Amino acid sequence: MRSLREYIRLYFMIEAQYIKGRMQYRSDFIISSVGMFFSSLATLGIFWVIFDTVPNLAGWSLMEMVFIYAFYMIAISPMQILFDHAWQLRYHVQQGTFLKYYFRPLNMMFYYMSEIFDLKGLTQLVTGIALLIYASIQLHIDWSLWRISLLFIALFSAALVQISIIVAASCAAFWVVNSYPVLGLAWKLREFSPYPMSIFDGAFRFTFTYVIPIGFVAFYPSQLFLRPQDVSSLVYFSPMIGVGLFAITYWIWTKGVNSYTGTGS
Amino acid sequence: MDLDDIEHSFYNRQSLLFLFYFLGKIMSLIHIENLSKHFSILNRREGLGGAFRDLFSGDYRTVKAVDGISFDIDAGEIVGYIGPNGAGKSTTIKMMTGILKPSGGTIEVNGITPYANRIRQAQIMGVVFGQRTQLWWDLPVIESFKILKEIYKVDQKTFDEHMGLFNDLVDLKKLYTQQVRTLSLGQRMLCDITASFLHNPQVVFLDEPTIGLDISVKAKMRSVIKELNQVRNTTIILTTHDLGDVEALCQRIIIIDKGSVLYDGDIKKVNSLFGAYRTLKLQIDGYNDSTLQTLQDAFTQKFGPEHGIAIAATEEFWTDVTIDQARTPLADVLNFIMTTFTVSDVRIVEISMENVVRKVYDGALK
Ligand SMILES: Nc1ncnc2c1ncn2[C@@H]1O[C@H](COP(=O)(O)OP(=O)(O)OP(=O)(O)O)[C@@H](O)[C@H]1O
Ligand SMILES: [Mg+2]
């Protein structure tokens, strides 16, 4: 067995080369980054428009919404940056190019996902961090050491939730020929996560909390910093939810990998 | 000698036999017994309604891709694993490399079951699946090798030696800084082969490594494979449709068709099959229904009844004359035809895999 340290070393080695290679397509990176930046801005624009007509959204102020949105941007970045290859799984499985991932003495999910490192996600991460700082200054959040550690834990769990949902959805490719709608749906759902869950009615809120828990990507964990006094106790379980979901996803992935029979060749 | 001694030597013989049996088992690198792989395939119904019904009551059919094969391969062998399209070659290799779980039977590579020990299996093997590169698409060739060095924990000295060897063999150095995606197919295949031997694996599986390559790259490929097998005693399992590869590399071949082993043994016997046979494709002027008979009669008259020449009309205007050179030299037949008939076009073709298999079925090796 390879140790975690060896994996991390290998990961850096692969990504360093990958980024070097990508730098040939610098314009590619710049354009997609700009695109990503403006699409985030557009969402903020929507908040602006909403708050122009109503003073608050289910009791949440504009600046609080900005904070939640910033949290969301940071939380989905690891999925974007590290697990972007999930999008091509369907292609590899159908073309038979997935076979090669069995041939190295490495964990297959690691090997597969390490093949792409999405640079534009870094832009999103940086934008998110800037926005989070801005919003927390505006909201006078007082960052004690304890709060900061809590923020890291919360972001880590939220990132795991998002990664799990996307990777699990991409695994549909192992069993279904036209699996795109599954991943497409998972991707779309992500857009609901920066909104207060209370604006959704019962069935949706239940789904977003317990079934496909996108509420845990941004809204629920943000409460820890915005309204610490009335956080529901469920929120304290979010690390377990993150780890648990990832374990389930990993199990699905393993099932898929073992049941894959490839294409004729 | 008293009773005790007799008993003693008896036990010794027993244990010796057992030891030999055991050594035999240990020594064969790959042990396959009654191995099979069956795929069940959904017969898809047409249309949207059909697709919906398939969801609930699938109508499955079974494809027996590999159906009860057995063989042992020793360390250091180069084995040609051949057969027509769809014979089950790639499926067998996928089981040997640990991708597919067999439907039945046993498979052991170096004493372990590949499917259940994928990572351990990966450490001791190299694989090339023709035309599908395993290198990092966006990286320069040399960086791919460096990553592999890290993955397989190859030390610097071995790495340098290996790269040196390949520079000598295929002049790889000039490709080092090129991105894999920009390599030509032949260059990429050479890099892939190089990569598959990098960690000094015990066994290398090559599934159609020469497909789509021109003659000179093919020749390079063959010399590389041969050299490595000799220098490092690497076991090599090779599938190919190019009988030239097999002739150049293998001492032993295994022919499979429809998932079963048809022949397993020395190549020499089979060589006489495809080594000696050549087919002349002729376009004869004034071809008509009686042409075949006329040819047949002319051959019998000229070369005697045991001429070993088969005649068939395969495509329009073309007549195939397959010659067993062990009995009648090709040159004589060609000469005779050119002087006796008016021929507008001639081609000489090597015997195809399909023909070899047909001959094996017809009992050519019995
Ligand atoms: N993943 C799969 N699902 C269903 N059937 C398969 C699958 N892979 C292979 N088969 C079937 O199994 C049989 C053997 O295929 P295989 O790829 O092993 O043949 P092969 O000997 O490698 O042929 P070729 O020389 O054309 O590469 C074929 O009939 C093929 O259709
Ligand atoms: Mg094949």
Image (cartoon, coloured by chain):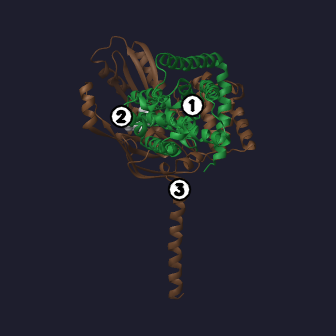
Chain colours: A green, B brown
Q: Secondary structure at mark 2?
A: helix
Q: Quadrant of residue A144?
A: top right
Q: Is residue A38 visible?
A: yes
Q: Which residue is mark 3?
A: B111
Q: Which residue is mark 2?
A: A202
Q: Is residue B249 visible?
A: no
Q: Hey, what amino acid is under mark 2?
A: Gly
Q: Position of residue B51 (x, y in %)?
A: 28, 29
Q: Pointer 1 and pointer 3: residues touching (CB < 8 Å)?
A: no
Ligand 1 is within 8 Å of the C-beta of the residue at disc 3: no
Residue B261 or residue A180, whichever sits in front:
A180
Q: Is residue A217 above or below residue A43?
A: below
- So how many labels did they put on this image? 3
Which is closer to the viewer, label 2 or label 1? 2
| Residue at 61% from the left image edge and 38% from the top image edge | A151
Let me know if marks 3 and 2 both belong to one chain.
no
Which is closer to the viewer, label 3 or label 2? 2
Q: Hey, what amino acid is under mark 3?
A: Gly
Q: Position of residue B351 (x, y in %)?
A: 44, 30
Q: Position of residue B280 (x, y in %)?
A: 43, 23
Query: For this view, does B92 lie left or right of residue B51?
Result: right
Q: Hey, what amino acid is under mark 1?
A: Phe
Q: Label 3 vs label 2: CA separation? A: 58 Å
Q: Which residue is mark 1?
A: A71
**How packed is label 2: few (under 14 Cα within 10 Å), some, or many (20 or more)?**
few
Q: Position of residue B89 (x, y in %)?
A: 44, 39
Quarter of the image with the C terminus of chain A in it: top left
Ligand 1 is within 8 Å of the C-beta of the residue at disc 2: no
Residue B166 or residue A183, whichever sits in front:
A183
Query: For this view, does A141 lie left or right of residue B299?
Result: right
